[in-house]
Amino acid sequence: MKKLVAIGGLVIAAAVYLGGTTLVGSGAALRGQAADMHAALMRLEDRVPAGTLHDTQWKVFIAEVDRAVAAGDRSAAAYQWRHAYALALGTHGWEPLLEVGNAALRVDAMSPERRADHRNAREAYMAALLRARRAASAEGTEAVAEGFAGIGDGETARLVRAMSLRYAAANAGGQF
């Protein structure tokens, strides 16, 4: 089984057939789609910067996306979205990438075919997931799960929600 995810213009295998191999994480063996997701996140680890900026410049471009959407200018909306995404990658935290993913859905909604793959939203949500995972954020992973559910990827949403519950339990127990 293979899924492709584009991050920063690179297309990588996000889920690969592991031939029965299990990956170990947090003391428990991962199998199936959970192992595939773990493998995908590990591959993204080097491709998604940690982000050091606390800049909010990306919000200016999100506002421009929304203006273009309101004006019905899909080309301008997509152009402004790319700028917002690039700036969000440079920031610290998962929130900017989640917002950029949500903006991608507004751009997709302008298209007559309404891009069923939601490639740009998925790309931003995967980057947001990686950042939320790095921070062991229950809030972040739950928000990203909602994003995946919103694009119709129920299985990824389920796996990310399970991750969110683990982080919430661990944070309540003082383990992170």
Image (tube, rainbow, N blue to C red):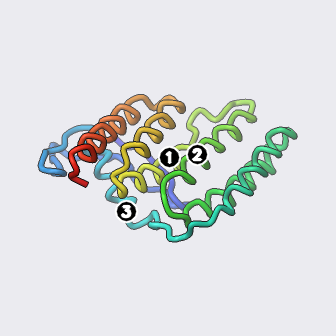
**Residue drawn at 35 percent across, 31 percent down:** 158
Q: State whether residue 34 is above or below residue 79.
A: above
Percent position (x, y) of residue 95?
53, 51
Tell me the CA gap for discs 3 and 1.
14 Å
**Label 3 environment density (alpha carbons within 10 Å; few <14, some 14–19, many ≥20):** some
Q: Is residue 147 shown left or right of residue 20?
A: right
First in sequence, mark 3 or 1: give its number.
3
Residue located at (29% from left, 52% from top): 39
Give me the disc on residue 101. 2
Q: Secondary structure at mark 2?
A: helix
Question: If you read the primary sequence from the N terminus, does the residue marked by circle 2 or circle 3 appear first?
Answer: 3
Answer above or below: position of 62 versus 117.
below
Q: Amino acid at mark 2?
A: Gly
Q: Where does the image place residue 35, in percent across and percent down from the top left?
A: 24, 45
Residue at (75%, 48%) from the top-left corner?
65
> Do the residues under discs 2 and 3 have CB atoms within 8 angstroms?
no
Q: Amino acid at mark 3?
A: Glu
Q: Position of residue 112 (x, y in %)?
A: 75, 30
Q: Do we see residue 17 in this rendering?
A: no
Callout 2 touching callout 1 (CB < 8 Å): yes
Kind of residue at disc 1: Tyr
Disc number for residue 125: 1
Residue indicated by mark 3? 45
Number of on-image labels: 3
